[in-house]
Image: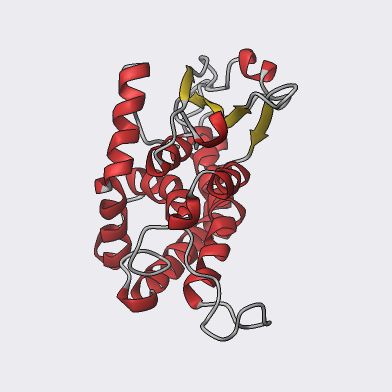
């Protein structure tokens, strides 16, 4: 049982960002229940998820204790990650915040912590929107329309990629390659030599992207980083957990 006798339930959706929360819970050593859901033919979440949270998205967790009148419902990956780290021993996944002797001062934060705070927000705020848009463009190209109309959505998608999308995705990959190359104390993680919650947040976009967009020789540090994350014991336990409950696992956008 988790600290304070909390009961945690994670509502997991296939091909979604909820896998990061499974990994986080495994990394924290917290007991939890896992309820899995499958997407429909249109790749949308089932309506049952709206009974948990009005937006019907995943991941969502509920937290219950004996002192609560009703379960606490928490959505959004970053929000969930910060809450669980705050209450269930996540300090081991957060770098020390202050330089010695500069506690509480403006600019007194360590580079490791500054990176950690940044990448906690970058994963969803900067990187994921471009990857999701690329997924939409790919589906537009393969839309089930009559053959004589098919060139139109493909033309539109190609123009969006050419004018806006490709350069931004490449720019983000270039940025991540440089960040890994210059990670504190030589890395190999984004914030330094140890795994952080920010790496767990980053795991979904970089692993899923690597399966759709070959990184090649241009991004050796990013390729190594993706492989490193997938070899983490906590990640492997999370994959096994989903396979036990759902029968399969696929890291995919």
Looking at the image, residue 146 lies above or below residue 228: above
Q: Nearer the viewer, residue 103 or 139?
A: 103
Left or right of 235 on screen, residue 31? right
Looking at the image, residue 33 lies above or below residue 129: above
Q: Which quadrant holds residue 179?
A: bottom left
Q: Could you tell me which residue is drawn at 47 percent across and 22 percent down?
A: 33
Q: Could you tell me which residue is drawn at 33 percent across and 70 percent down?
A: 187
Residue 38 spot, x, y in % from top left: 48, 17
Q: Can the viewer see residue 182 in this picture?
A: no
Report the coloring of the rendering.
secondary structure
Q: Which quadrant holds residue 170?
A: bottom left
Number of numbered discs visible in the structure rendering = 0
Residue 15 spot, x, y in % from top left: 45, 30
Q: Which quadrant holds residue 64?
A: top right
Q: Nearer the viewer, residue 16 or 141?
A: 16
Quadrant of the image containing the C terminus: top left
Left or right of 157 on screen, residue 50? right
* Residue occupying the far bottom of the picture: 101
Q: Nearer the viewer, residue 112 or 229?
A: 112
Residue 225 spot, x, y in % from top left: 31, 59
Q: Could you tell me which residue is drawn at 43 percent across and 56 percent down?
A: 92
Residue 35 spot, x, y in % from top left: 49, 18
Q: Can the viewer see residue 166 in this picture?
A: yes
Left or right of 238 on screen, residue 35? right
Q: Could you tell me which residue is drawn at 75 percent across and 22 percent down?
A: 69
């Amino acid at each position: 049982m988790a600290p304070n006798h909390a009961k945690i339930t994670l509502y997991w959706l296939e091909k979604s960002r909820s896998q990061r929360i499974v990994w986080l819970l495994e990394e924290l050593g917290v007991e939890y229940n896992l309820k899995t859901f499958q997407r429909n033919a249109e790749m949308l979440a089932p309506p049952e998820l709206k009974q948990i949270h009005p937006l019907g998205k995943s991941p969502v967790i509920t937290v219950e204790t004996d002192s609560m009148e009703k379960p606490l419902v928490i959505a959004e990956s970053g929000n969930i990650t910060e809450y669980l780290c705050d209450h269930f021993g996540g300090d081991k996944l957060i770098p020390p915040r202050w330089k010695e002797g500069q506690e509480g001062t403006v600019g007194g934060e360590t580079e490791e912590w500054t990176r950690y705070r940044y990448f906690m927000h970058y994963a969803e705020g900067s990187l994921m929107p471009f990857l999701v848009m690329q997924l939409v463009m790919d589906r537009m190209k393969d839309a089930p329309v009559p053959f004589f109309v098919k060139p139109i959505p493909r033309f539109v998608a190609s123009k969006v990629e050419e004018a806006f999308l490709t350069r931004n995705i490449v720019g983000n990959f270039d940025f991540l390659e440089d960040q890994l190359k210059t990670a504190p104390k030589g890395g190999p993680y984004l914030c330094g030599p140890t795994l952080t919650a920010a790496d767990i947040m980053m795991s979904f976009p970089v692993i899923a992207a690597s399966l759709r967009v070959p990184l090649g020789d241009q991004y050796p540090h990013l390729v190594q980083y993706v492989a490193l994350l997938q070899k983490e014991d906590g990640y492997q336990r999370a994959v096994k957990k989903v396979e036990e409950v759902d029968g399969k696992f696929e890291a995919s956008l």
